[in-house]
Amino acid sequence: MRDPRDVPGYLAPVRQALTQPILMGGAPRSYAILNGTLAAIVAFAGAIVPGIILGIAGHVLGVFLARRDPDVIEVLKRAMRISGRLEC
């Protein structure tokens, strides 16, 4: 036993990958997919340079937010469901 508080027979190792959020390039996965899709739509619509700039800027924003809180997108989605969020 490593710690006196451990109960014998109830030790279960948990892999680190199961406790960390899923990130793509440092940004939350759902955000990165949405950002890439929007940047591709703009780029394929004929504005290639603004699409690339939008994609890079959006990804940098996602990485910045994920470093502060990896669950920022889930928190924002949940906050947007609250009906009286704009009322004082």
Image (spheres, rainbow, N blue to C red):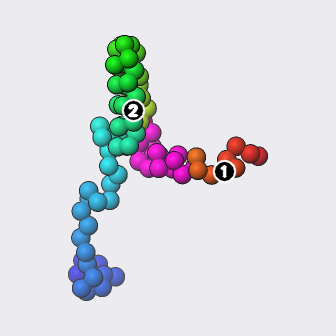
Q: Which mark is first along the chain, 1 or 2?
A: 2
Residue 31 lies, with reference to residue 43, above or below; the image says below
Query: What secondary structure do most residues of the magenta stretch adopt?
Result: helix
Residue in view at x 66 percent, y 50 percent: 83
* Residue situated in front as seen by the camera: 25 or 82: 82
* Residue situated in front as seen by the camera: 27 or 48: 48
First to last magenta residue range: 64-79
Residue in view at x 40 percent, y 28 percent: 38
Query: Does dot 1 land on a helix, a strand or a loop?
Result: loop
Could you say which quadrant of the image residue 54 lies in?
A: top left
Three-letter amino acid code at the position of disc 2: Asn
Could you say which quadrant of the image residue 48 lies in?
A: top left
Residue picked out by circle 2: 35
Query: Does dot 2 land on a helix, a strand or a loop?
Result: helix
Q: Where is residue 4 in the image (x, y as percent from the top left)?
A: 31, 83
Within the magenta stretch, is there residue 29? no
The answer to whether any part of residue 4 appears in the image is no
Numbered label attached to residue 83? 1
Could you say which quadrant of the image residue 25 lies in?
A: top left
Farthest-out residue, bottom: 8
Residue 13 lies, with reference to residue 66, above or below; the image says below
The answer to whether any part of residue 5 appears in the image is yes
Residue in view at x 30 percent, y 81 percent: 6
Within the magenta stretch, is there residue 70? yes
Three-letter amino acid code at the position of disc 1: Ser
